[in-house]
């Protein structure tokens, strides 16, 4: 896959929780927009095979992680998220996930093996996370996080991937300029990773 997919996936895996919480359509969520309301009957699509494998893997590795929520795909837009299956009180944790089964980047974190130290130090958090995703993806089906990596999205319908004509058709100069800056930035990231010894061709 192109590095842009991994960069977008990094952002998705880091920030997707907010969208997932907003889509939670199960029992009322105390303190939120659904507080005090009856159950919201969201129409749901069947999970993909990758998602089903992830759910089974999560149940084995972290039995309590999904005790209050379930993975779901919501119609009509086909948005993936989490649906509450039990009442969740205000400030109560809805999901707990072991750090050993997660990818994480922190300030001052050492560069992974075979990754240029200057590249790692100069990279933004989302580039560092993309590097970690590449390494996990390279582990293949036997990797420690393979079911989770396989369940991550591989395509994003965002302006970054649109043609110039499609972006121009919006007649929105600010967005056109933002897309141009993003493409330029990600092209530099791709070049820097190649020079820094990161193989960007091994991920699907």
Image (spheres, rainbow, N blue to C red):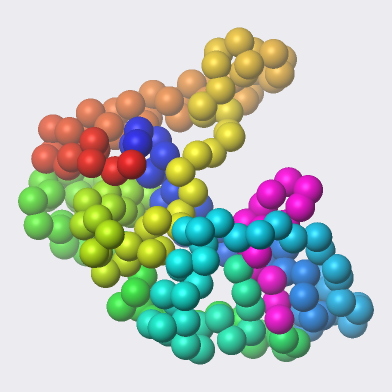
Residue 143 spot, x, y in % from top left: 25, 64
Q: Residue at x 45, y 67 (%)?
A: 53
Residue 113 spot, x, y in % from top left: 9, 57
Number of numbered callouts drawn: 0
Left/right placement of residue 32 relative to residue 72 reads right
**Does residue 96 lie above or below 168 as drawn?**
below
Q: Residue at x 40, y 63 (%)?
A: 148
Q: Residue at x 35, y 36 (%)?
A: 1
Q: Work out whether residue 116 can be spotted.
A: yes
Q: Work out whether residue 132 can be spotted.
A: no
**Does residue 71 lie above or below 190 as drawn?**
below
Left/right placement of residue 138 relative to residue 124 reads left
Left/right placement of residue 93 relative to residue 188 reads right
**Does residue 44 lie above or below 65 as drawn?**
above
**Magenta-highlighted residues:** 72-85
- Residue nearer the viewer, 34 or 173: 34
């Amino acid at each position: 896959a192109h590095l842009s997919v991994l960069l977008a996936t990094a952002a998705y895996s880091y920030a997707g929780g907010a969208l997932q919480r907003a889509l939670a359509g199960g029992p009322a969520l105390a303190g939120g927009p659904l507080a005090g309301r009856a159950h919201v009957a969201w129409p749901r699509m069947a999970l993909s095979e990758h998602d089903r494998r992830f759910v089974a893997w999560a149940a084995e590795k972290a039995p309590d992680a999904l005790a209050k929520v379930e993975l779901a795909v919501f119609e009509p837009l086909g948005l993936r998220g989490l649906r509450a299956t039990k009442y969740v009180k205000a400030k109560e944790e809805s999901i707990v996930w072991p750090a050993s089964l997660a990818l994480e980047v922190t300030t001052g974190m050492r560069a992974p093996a075979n990754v240029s130290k200057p590249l790692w130090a100069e990279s933004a958090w989302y580039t560092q996370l993309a590097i970690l995703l590449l390494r996990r993806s390279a582990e293949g089906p036997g990797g420690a996080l393979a079911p989770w990596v396989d369940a991550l999205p591989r395509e994003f319908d965002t302006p970054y991937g649109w043609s110039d004509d499609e972006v121009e058709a919006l007649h929105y100069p600010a967005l056109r300029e933002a897309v141009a800056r993003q493409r330029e930035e990600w092209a530099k990231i791709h070049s820097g990773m190649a020079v820094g010894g990161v193989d960007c061709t091994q991920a699907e």
